[in-house]
Image (tube, rainbow, N blue to C red):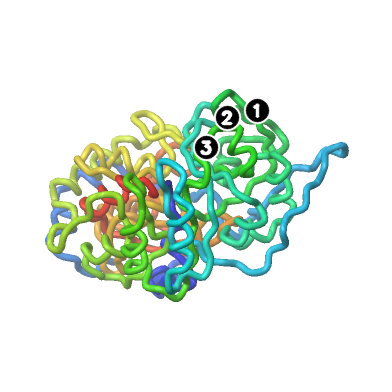
Amino acid sequence: MASQGPTSAHDPAATQDSAAAQNSAAGQAPAATAKTAGDSGPAAAATAGRAAKSWPAAAGVQLPGRVGASLKAVQVAKTPAAAPTPAVAPLSKLRPADLLVVAPTSLPAAVAAKIRRLPGVTAAAALDAATIKVNGKFVQMLGVNPGAFRAFAAGPTARSTSLWRSVAGGDIAVSYTMGKQDKLPLGGSVSVAGQRPEILRVGGYGTVGIAGVDAVVSDAVARTLGLPTSNALVISAPHASLAALAKKIKADLPHGAGIAQLVLQVQPGVAAQAQAAAAGAAGATLPTAGTATAMTPAQVQAFLKAAVSRVGMPYIWGAAGPTSFDCSGLVQWSMRQAGIVMPRVAADQARTGPRVSLSQLVPGDLLFYHTDATAPTYISHVAIYLGNGLMVQAPEPGMDVQIVRADFGAGFAGAVQVAPPVAAAVAGNPAG
């Protein structure tokens, strides 16, 4: 599954670099061609050593919506007059979603109880988790007790009682990105390929903020769809060392289960192998000390060449190439051309290497953004830095893959230097 992006109240690396705040977004870069990324010089320099770079101010960069700029928060469909409005438990307090456990089958009750008793764990909620087709596309879905789970969701989504009542009443809630970019009408219907095909009403747009999760239903609906029962656990441990806690939990998990760290507790410039440990990629083979190196110059070159070769191809939500893409699909496909395995969603891609400051930015680094008003700290967009102040991205429906000025203004969440062994570990973890 996908994870909460690497930003939270206790993620010191998630705060925007002070240099970023000094760059404002304003115009689109005119003509940039494959030559920008095709020159071996910048790519070689990227891995030979990180030197301070300079770039012009961003100008008219098109991102898929900006938080605070014409975006509404959680949107909920009107409840039909004859429909019941089930009650849900009120929101008492928000709980950060710090760790996610996912198993192929139901977690033993004794294991879940032991996890809840571990020092540092303040709360944990059982979930049903699976990948399932919605309107023909594979989507990460959770089955939840709406009243118990809402506290673990992103703030605006957690506070929307009408959205959770909708879920309790049998509707499906989808992420803001899925709802808007896949053009799902509020109050309309989607086809869900469960044990037998089910038609569910789209009750609302609200991103929960757990990486890659784009759909939420009640646990009762999850049962009818055939999702595994209580095979996942979301854990809040805001004052614990998450990497250490994840190791303790992993030791008690059944075979095939994984645990993902949903927020990062690392500083910019931390060695890639330390980042790998902090990423919580349990359930996959973790890199050992000294092996989690950055991309080679040849890999950077192949990655950038592949990405720029897709310029002009259309954005389609959920597409990952070779002729249409969403933002993270472009990154995943382009990395694959360089022989690098990447996780599928932007929030997980943000966990594939150490943070880098803007002064150390080089071609091949990934740029991450907050563009979702329903989950303002969630990583919801990714672009690829090309050098010379330019980036390539798949922006939003109705637009094509484009090269534009790199945006370091409002909504910029930070940059990451990809370490291939870390990326493979995150991609191979069943918990995302």
The residue that mark 2 highlights is: 192
User: In the image, is residue 181 above or below residue 125?
Assistant: above
- The amino acid type found where label 3 is placed reads Leu
| Closest to the observer, 380 or 67 | 380
Q: Which residue is disc 1 drawn over?
A: 199
Q: Is residue 348 visible?
A: yes
Residue located 31% across and 63% down the image: 247
Please give the residue where the numbered disc 3 appears in the rendered image. 227
**Disc 2 element:** strand
Badge 1 element: strand
Three-letter amino acid code at disc 1? Ile
First in sequence: mark 3 or mark 2? 2
Residue 311 location (% of width, % of height): 35, 37
> In front here: 129 or 354?
129
Q: Amino acid at mark 2?
A: Val
Q: Residue at x 48, y 39 (%)?
A: 130
Determine which quarter of the picture holds residue 344. Answer: top left
Image coords of residue 173 (percent x, y): 63, 44
Q: Disc 2 vs disc 1: Cβ atoms closer than 8 Å?
A: yes
Q: Count numbered badges in the picture.
A: 3
Crowd rating for badge 3 (residues with CA inside 10 Å; few <14, some 14–19, many 20+): many
* Disc nearest the viewer among 3 and 1: 3
Between the residue at mark 2 and the residue at mark 1, the CA separation in whole angstroms equals 6 Å
Front residue of 98/338: it is: 98
Q: CA distance from mark 3 to mark 2?
A: 12 Å
